[in-house]
Structures are given as C-alpha cells and as structure tokens.
Amino acid sequence: MVSPTFTFKTRLPSTTAVCAVLACVSIYIETSFLLEIVYRWMDKRTEKSCFEMVQGKQEVLTGDPDGWTWDEFESEVMRWSQARYGASYAIGLWCNQLKDISWLDLKDEEDFNIFKVECKKVYEIIAHENDSYATVLYSRECFWTKRWHEDYRRDQRQKLYDYLTTICRGEPLRLLEEEGKKWSESAGGLRYELYRRYGRINPEVLKNRVVNYCLGMPEVGGVTPWPPEVNLVDRLEQLEHEYNFLGKLPCDETKDHDKELTEEKLVEIVSDCVPDWCKEAVELARETCIEQAGTGCWWEISRNSAKESRHCNKSVRQPSYRQLKIQLVKSYDRRR
C-alpha cells in the first residue's frame, strides 16, 4: 500500500514586496537617526546659549566687568522700587532718607501736619495695589501712629533687601548677606554702602550735577527762578534728595565742591529760586531765625550725615532749611 504523499507549497513574497518593506525600514531608521541628531544639536545649542549667557555679560551686579555697571544696577533697582512706591518714597527707601518721624510730637499741630504728609504717601502706595484695603486702613486708629509706620518701613526695607539679593552675585551678594540688614538702617542705607564699593561717579558728571543743583534743578533750559506755577513741594523734595545724594558721596570725590554742599548754600539756592509770591515767606523765615538767635537756627537735613564737618557758621543769621521750608509750604498751601 502506497502511503499518500503531501506536498507543501510555500508562497514566497515577491521581490517588489521585499524591497518595499526594506525601504520602509530604511526610512524609519534614517528618520530616527536624523531626529536623534537634530535633538542632540538643539540640546547642545540650548546649552551653548545658556553657557554664553552665563559667560557673557550677566544682568546682575558682580563687581566685575562681566556684570552690570553701577548705573545699570541702580536703574534696575529704581525701576523695581518706583513701580511699587513712586519716585520719592523709592529714593527715600533706597538711601534710607525717609523723613525722620521719631522726634515728632503728634499732639503738636505743626508736627502732626508733617506726619500727616508721610501717612498720605503710604496711603497712596497701598492704594495703588489695593484701594479698598487702603481705604479701610486709612480710617483705622493704628494707621495714625508712629509705631505702625516704623514697622511698615522696616517691612519695605526687608523687601528691598530681598530683591537686591536676586540681582547680585559673587562678592556683592556675599556682602549683602553678611551686612545688608545692618546697612539698610544705617545712614545712607543700602545704596551708600554698595556705591562706596562698586560705584564711583565721573568727575565731569559730578560737576554738572553740582551746577544743576546750584541752579535749583531747573527742568527746562536752566531757567531760574522757578516759574510761578511750580509745584513747590515736589521741587523742594528734589533739591533735598540731590543735597543728600551729593552729601553722601565720599569726601575725596566732592572735596572741590564743599562750599556748594552746605546747608547754608541750600538755603541760599531756595531763597534765590522761589517765585515772587514766596518772597514774603522767605523774609518771615529770616525774621523767625533772628528772634530765635542762638537757639538753633541751623538744622541738618540728614541728622546722621557722614559729613558733619559741613555745618555752617552759626553766627550767620539765616534760617535753617527746616525753618525756611515750613514757611514756604505754608505759603504754598494758602496759594492753592
């Protein structure tokens, strides 16, 4: 008996099909390889950009040429501060030149009016962020205490210090972390100590600033006296800030300008620049000084000034800047 024979026929793929499969595999492999190359190139490019950013000019104060110049650094500080506090309060915070309220007697009408101006500044700062909260706070008794405002200032100095630590690297950052909190409450504030180490003013720039200061800091074309419509309070604050700024510079930088940086000169500048409707107030301030002869006509704007040698001759019977400012502001308020 013959066993049946089974024949298996295997159908081989055609040459065309094999080529198509191989082509697809090849394309896949090549594409994957190319993508891998692209990804690696992009990663390296990103790393290179980051490396160049770090190795190039850094947007921080480093104390070295690879970082910000002093002007760039201070511009960034003021940009951040002014957005939160406005120009006047920002400068006062940065230089620790906010009005000294510790000596004010709030039961005295004149002292309370000075304190009230400071309270309104803070109210406007808070209202800029949260108007409803500022309105409620303004009506609370605690807001009208020196203690509240001293605490508020301390909190804002801390915020400024925290911000500075984000835009300093290397030695400036190390010094800030070690001494910054002490500096923030010292004469001249954080700015004075950082500037003393990392910023020096160009002599020609200093000369121009002193000349502009002696002209009363005119806004347009060097015109003095101030126009009748001048905002007297703002202009006096500008002069005070410039006086304090120049007074905090190192003595070796300002030795050629000592005569221009006295309180006597400041009183002279203001007396010469105020419009005619202020002349009566100037004379009243002088008369007040004569009446109080020998009882402290002179008063330093910055009590903790590093240049105490700049006190003027007390035998000269001119009003102190404080006496003059009080009379001028009263006259300005009446005119408004």
Image (cartoon, helix red, strand yellow):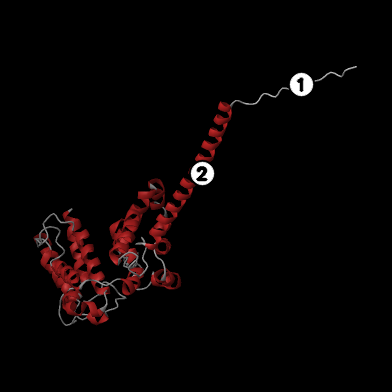
Left or right of 29: which side holds 109?
left
Who's the residue at 33% across and 52% down the image?
124
Q: Between 257 and 315, which is closer to the camera in this rendering?
A: 257
- Residue at the spot of label 2: 33
Q: Between 100 and 113, which is closer to the camera in this rendering?
A: 100
Q: In the figure, residue 154 lies in which quadrant?
A: bottom left
Q: CA distance from mark 2 to mark 1?
A: 45 Å
Question: Looking at the picture, which amino acid does disc 2 mark?
Answer: Phe
Q: Tell me the tag on residue 7.
A: 1
Look at the picture and state if 63 lies above or below 293: above
Tag 2: Cα neighbours inside 10 Å, few (<14), some, or many (≥20)? Answer: few
Where residue 19 appears, x then y in whole percent?
A: 55, 31
Q: In the figure, residue 91 lies in which quadrant?
A: bottom left
Q: Between 181 and 114, which is closer to the camera in this rendering?
A: 181
Question: Does residue 145 appear in the picture of this structure?
Answer: no
Where residue 132 appears, x then y in whole percent?
A: 40, 46
Question: Does residue 70 appear in the picture of this structure?
Answer: yes
Question: Looking at the picture, which amino acid does disc 1 mark?
Answer: Thr
